[in-house]
Amino acid sequence: MMNGGLKYQFARLNIAEKLIAINVLIFILDGLSGALLGYSFSTWFHLPKDFFEFLMQPWSLVTYSFFHAGFSHIFWNMMVLYFASRIFLNLFDAQRFINVYFLGLMLGGLVFLLSYNVFPTLVNSNTALIGASAGVNAILIFVCTYLPNQEVRVIFFNIRLWYIGAALVIKDLVMIGMGENIGGGMAHLGGAFLGYMYARQLFKGNDIGSGFTKLRNAIADLFKPREKKAPLKTVYRKKASTSSKQSYDRQAKQRKIDAILDKISKSGYESLSKEEKDFLFKAGKED
């Protein structure tokens, strides 16, 4: 028997790779629907610039990110997301990735809406917002802020992450100043701001996405089948020492992770020993 087909292959992907696969699939389906039917269903999922239109399709605050204007648009978004996620997921788990990505998308979308409805004469080029750029920017700026001095290879030379983040923000500011894709540029900056603030607050021990995690878990619980209550049984305390040992091991592991992350924030990723890098990588996979 082959390795379980497409479902199995999809399950093996990490969270970033799953998002990339979904974006590519929707891009293909959207293109096919326009070519074969002469009508694209995607307009129901784009984020409209008019606030009252948005109230009629509030889901578009998230769904707009899964649609792209063309091959170049989706190609560069997915490329940046893939490489930024490799750094992100080497440090943090999938839940935090989801927080940064989707909160970036939503803040970017809200900034887009505000820019049109507060300054309608200034921003008049877009009819709706599409593309994952705000979420991608949130992930990229997050890692640029969290590991500013980490060097990455760009074609033929190494460059520090904070240079890349600064160049990205400056590019969007210049485009807005030139009047090019102002609404999209505002959304990009909204996502970038979310990524920056998320990383800065983590330095202080604050996870600003914890509320979003609780909301997602609460929504997921609504769709879980309720388990039948089993008859009451007498429960005996046993293996308490095993449970205590497991709890102690978890706490010790977390303390070691925190110490490594603190070392990264002070001296950069390259200051870690091979043992520390391996430990961090394995801990990320287990989460």
Image (tube, rainbow, N blue to C red):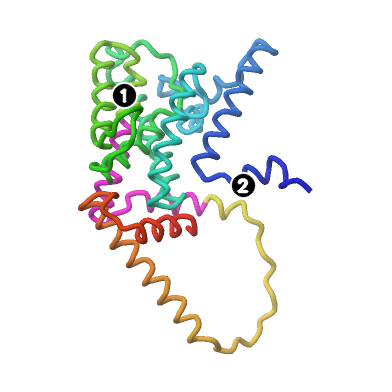
Indicate the position of residue 251 as horizontal and vertical percent values.
Answer: 38, 71
Indicate the position of residue 225 as horizontal and vertical percent values.
Answer: 66, 57
Magenta part of the protein: which range?
190-218
Residue placed most toward the observer, 266 or 108? 266
Q: Is residue 234 above or below residue 104?
A: below
Residue placed most toward the observer, 210 or 171? 171
- The residue at 35%/60% (across/down) is 276
Q: Which quadrant would residue 188 be assigned to in this image? A: top left
- For label 1, the residue is 186
| Amino acid residing under circle 2 | Ala
As helix, strand or loop, the secondary structure at mark 1 comes to helix
Q: Residue furthest front?
A: 156
- The residue at 52%/39% (across/down) is 17
10 with respect to 146 (left or right): right
230 with respect to 146 (left or right): right
Look at the image and say whether residue 14 sits in the magenta stretch: no
Indicate the position of residue 156 as horizontal and vertical percent values.
Answer: 33, 28
Look at the image and say whether residue 200 sits in the magenta stretch: yes
The disc label shown at residue 11, or none: 2
The disc label shown at residue 70, or none: none
Residue placed most toward the observer, 119 or 2? 2
